[in-house]
Amino acid sequence: MKIIALLVLANLGGIALSNKLYEEHDRLVTWRLRNIVDKYKYLATGNSEFSQWIEKINNVAAQRSLEARLDTESEFKQYDKQRQLLEDNITQRLNTLRSLISLRKGGKRCVRFYQHQENELKNAYKLSNQRKQELYINNGMECPARPEIQGYDYDYYGGY
Ligand SMILES: *[C@@H]1O[C@H](CO)[C@@H](O)[C@H](O)[C@H]1NC(C)=O
């Protein structure tokens, strides 16, 4: 009898303990989500994809489902990691472009070509990851050599 009573008590104790751990974990997840909102709400301003993420995080932080909160947190982290990698690449390309421009690399025609890329990229920070990626890829070209014959290609690049 005594042993059974002890086992029952120990078992109940285990449940109480795991409930406590669960609650602790639950609170921690909510705290992390609120932290994301506090940390990023200003940075996200003007970037509609980023702002929507912050709004989603803010909403899910108030939800009961721990699973929903954990899922949203991990999806956001993926988005945010990609965003940072893309922004690092854009910043690096902008630095390269600014140095090419200040060295007047390739003369006036190429300076215009690089300034056009610089304008496209410096406005890319507030765009969606998809657009960042496209602009980064589309603005990584070297200034094309001046064509020998003023043909189709020359007209194509003539604007720069
Ligand atoms: C950043 O640039 C490097 C080098 O061009 C490229 O390999 C990488 O995929 C780029 N990162 C992203 C997230 O596009």
Image (cartoon, grey):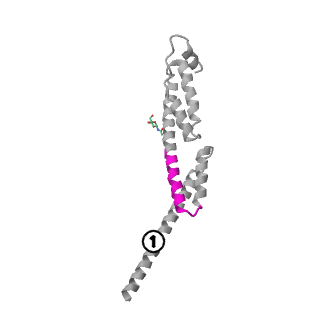
With respect to residue 12, does 45 lie above or below? above
- Tally of marks: 1
Q: Residue at x 58, y 16 (%)?
A: 155
Instruction: Indicate the amino acid at tag 1.
Output: Ser
* Residue underneath mark 1: 18
Q: Residue at x 53, y 21 (%)?
A: 110
Q: What is the residue that sits farthest to the top in this orientation?
A: 149
With respect to residue 118, does 41 lie above or below? below
**Residue 78 falls within the magenta-colored stretch:** yes
Residue 80: image x %, image y %? 52, 47
Q: Residue at x 56, y 15 (%)?
A: 152
Residue 5: image x %, image y %? 40, 86
Question: Splitting the image into 4 quarters, where does residue 17 fall?
Answer: bottom left
**Which range is magenta?**
62-81
Would residue 56 be visible to someone looking at this image?
Answer: yes
Question: Splitting the image into 4 quarters, where does residue 157 fall?
Answer: top right
With respect to residue 3, does 99 lie above or below? above
The quarter in which the C terminus is drawn is top right
- Mark 1: secondary structure: helix
Q: Any atom of ligand 1 within 8 Å of the CB at mark 1?
A: no
Q: What is the residue that sits farthest to the left in this orientation?
A: 3
